[in-house]
Every structure is written in C-alpha cells, then in structure tokens.
Image (tube, rainbow, N blue to C red):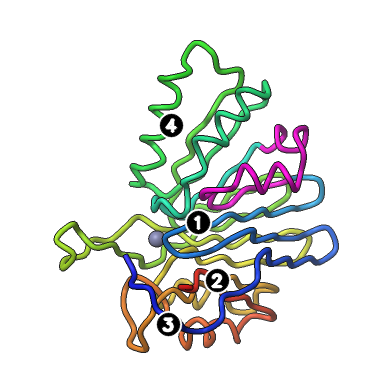
Amino acid sequence: MMKKKLRNPTPKFPIVWKKKDFSIKIFCSIPNIATGILLTAGENHFVIDPGDGILRDLSKELGVESLKNICNIFVTHGHHDHLGGVWSLLTYLRVMNKTSPLKIYYPSGCIEIESIYHAFTKVYSHNLPYKIELKKISEGKKITIKNVKVKPFAVIHKEYLSNTKEKRAVPALGFHFKYNGKTICYGGDTGYCDSLVKAAKGADLAILEAGHEDAASDDMHMTMEEAQSIGKSAKEFVLVHIPE
Ligand SMILES: [Zn+2]
C-alpha cells in the first residue's frame, strides 16, 4: 500500500496510441485503484489487466456485440487494481448470452484469478452459456493469437505481508505484443529488471509503470527515473501507474 503524496502530474486518461490497425487504449492505470487496457489488432480486441471499471469502459468503447466477441484476456498479476473488474465482466457476458469461449491468460501461481474463476463457475454452473478457459503461462512461452505474437516475460513485483514489514514475491508477467511488424511492450507492475529492459528496447511503444514514490530503487515499483530510462530505449513510451 502506498502513502498518498503529491508528485509528478498524473497522465490524462484515456491514453491512446495507434499505428494503422494496431492500437492500444489505456482507460485507466492508477495504483491501488484500477488499471484497464484494450489492445486492438485488426478486428480483434484483447483486454489487458481488467481492473475495476473495465466493463463500463469496454461497454462505452465497443458496444454489446464487439464486447461479446472478446475472447482473450491477459492478466499481469493478481493485485486487485489489475483484476478487480473480472467478475462483473464475466457476469455481463453471461447475461448478454456470449457463446464463444473466453480465454484468460495469467501468470502461473496467480491464485487470485483461479479463485475468481472457481467461484464464478460454481455460482453459475447451471447457467453459463460460454466456456471460460484458464491459460496459465510462464516466461518465454510464446503464443500467437489472431496474428498477434505474445511473448510473456517475468518481472519483479513484491507485496507487503500483513505485518507491513516483510515482503513476498508476486507471480507477475509483462507482455510483449507484435502485430504487422509493430511492437508494444507492457511491463505491468514491476521494479527495474533486465527482462523489462530487454523487452522494451526498440519497441514501437513501451508502457511503463512509475509507481514508486521515492527516489531510491526497490523491488515493487519503478521510480520515475528508472521508468524513463527504460522508456528512452523504445521508439515511444508512456508512463502509467503513477501515484496521484
Ligand atoms: Zn501490483
């Protein structure tokens, strides 16, 4: 948990980046509140980090039919500000009678998404018109979906235990997306790490968190300077997840 402190200006959301038919829209990325990202490649939409408010934002952006056609969701890690909107999204798709399968890609060991899935499929076991497939992924396991090449990479992200002194590592991934020769790197929540440095280098767009409040480096979030130094190795970058 972070203390509230005034610092660098928060980016204005939504943040939109587009190169021909490959685009990304960051509806929101505020630490401890919510993240929500839509990636579009040609006619296909992919949801990344469905935090609170994602149903509202997707509904406004896409309308019912396109929303029902979404078949792929990517989750970087299990913190509530990255998947707090999953339940309402799954429920909406049920009510709207989605029939195509929905795949949720998530880091191995992320019990939050598995728990939501088990609870949801239990509650609606007799009344679920579409199939949900959990797809556990780990670093380096490349996947291609609808001509989008996705390369997950491990990042460093920790959380405090309830005694607020000790930390534990959270299963966390960043994603490198490639479509039609253009690349987008999204690090999710991460401290400064080599895998992110490598993934962001030369990317057409790097989406980098700058969630750490202090100037000194740590293993939960990046400082503004760290995020910028990585961002400069990409063709373009945006900083997100900045404390308000
Ligand atoms: Zn986090």
Q: Residues within 10 Å of mark 2 (few under 14, many from 20)?
A: many
Distance CA(mark 3)–CA(mark 2): 11 Å
The disc, 3 or 2, on the residue closer to the chain's N-terminal end is 3
> Can the viewer see residue 54?
yes
Q: Which mark is residue 223?
A: 3
> Can the viewer see residue 99?
no
Instruction: Verify whether residue 47 appears in magenta.
Output: yes
The disc, 4 or 3, on the residue closer to the chain's N-terminal end is 4
> Does ligand 1 reach within 8 Å of label 2's beta carbon?
no
Q: Nearer the viewer, residue 99 or 195?
A: 99
The disc, 1 or 4, on the residue closer to the chain's N-terminal end is 1
Q: Nearer the viewer, mark 1 or mark 4?
A: 1
- Name the residue rendered at 53%, 28% in the picture: 132
> Does ligand 1 reach within 8 Å of label 4's beta carbon?
no
Q: Position of residue 187 (x, y in %)?
A: 51, 67
Distance CA(mark 4)–CA(mark 3): 34 Å
Q: Residues within 10 Å of mark 4 (few under 14, many from 20)?
A: some
- Name the residue rendered at 21%, 65% in the picture: 167
- Name the residue rendered at 63%, 80% in the picture: 234
Q: Which mark is residue 240?
A: 2
Residue behind mark 4? 117
> What's the residue type where badge 3 is placed?
Thr
> What's the residue type where badge 1 is placed?
Ala
Q: Which residues are magenta?
A: 45-70
> What's the residue type where badge 2 is placed?
Val
Distance CA(mark 2)–CA(mark 1): 11 Å
The residue positioned farthest toward the top in the image shown: 126
Instruction: Examine the image and state in which quarter residue 55 appears.
Output: top right
Residue behind mark 1? 34
Q: Residues within 10 Å of mark 1 (few under 14, many from 20)?
A: many
